[in-house]
């Protein structure tokens, strides 16, 4: 399974160690704790805002997803506040950078 191949298609996968029961981030085929092989699953894509900032008309935020990984993304709808719930509604790769677009869901 290749994380980037799937991300290009707009699918957000996370690697999880079946032994440690942790999500391994950045995504990897192997657990960074026990070095065994991870399994892949589709991310729930839900999380909360840890930080956000505004630049012109774009709102960027750092969100914590699945209680374990932190991603940088753009908020495309809703009024951001720290701690608010978000959902990743779009993701992919442009110019070799990952992008995540999020909507506020509460
Ligand atoms: Zn492990």
Image (spheres, grey):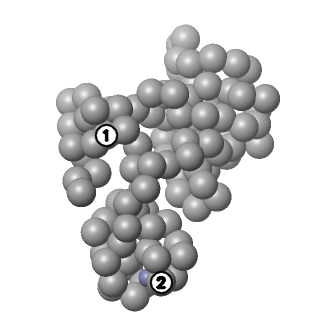
The residue tagged with tag 1: helix, strand or loop? helix
Residue 36 circle label? none
Residue 56 in the figure: left or right of residue 93: right
Mark 2 or 1: the one toward you = 2
> Where does the image place residue 73, in percent across and percent down from the top left?
49, 34
Disc with the residue nearer the chain's start (2 vs 1): 1
- Asked whether mark 2 lies closer than 8 Å to ligand 1, one says yes
Picture quadrant where residue 12 is located: top left
Q: Name the residue located 73 percent from the left edge and 20 percent from the top edge.
A: 79
Residue 105, compared with residue 4, is above or below; it is above
Specify whether 8 is left or right of 31.
left
Residue 10 in percent (x, y) is at 35, 32
At which x and y percent is residue 26? 38, 60
Mark 1 lies on residue: 7
Query: Residue 106, percent across and down?
Result: 78, 29
**Towards the viewer: 44 or 85:** 44
Q: Quadrant of residue 35?
A: bottom left
Q: Look at the numbered disc 1 and say if its residue's Cβ is closer than 8 Å to ligand 1.
A: no
Residue 86, relative to residue 15: is it above or below? above
Q: Secondary structure at mark 2?
A: loop
Residue at figure coordinates x 38%, y 79% from the top left: 32
Q: For ligand 1, which image quadrant applies? A: bottom left
Q: Is residue 59 visible?
A: yes
Q: Residues within 10 Å of mark 1 (few under 14, many from 20)?
A: some
Which of the image's four quarters has the N terminus?
Answer: bottom left
Q: Residue at x 58, y 50 (%)?
A: 65
Cα gap from disc 2 to disc 1, whole angstroms: 25 Å
Residue marked by disc 2: 19
Q: Are marks 2 and 1 in contact (CB under 8 Å)?
A: no
């Amino acid at each position: 399974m290749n994380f980037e191949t799937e991300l290009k298609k707009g699918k957000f996968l996370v690697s999880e160690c079946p032994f440690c029961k942790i999500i391994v981030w950045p995504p990897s085929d192997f657990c960074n704790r026990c070095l065994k092989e991870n399994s892949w699953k589709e991310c729930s894509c839900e999380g909360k805002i840890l930080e956000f900032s505004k630049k012109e008309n774009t709102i960027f935020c750092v969100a914590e997803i699945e209680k374990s990984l932190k991603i940088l993304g753009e908020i495309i709808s809703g009024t951001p506040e720290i701690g608010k719930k978000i959902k990743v509604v779009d993701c992919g790769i442009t110019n070799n950078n990952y992008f995540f677009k999020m909507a506020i869901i509460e």
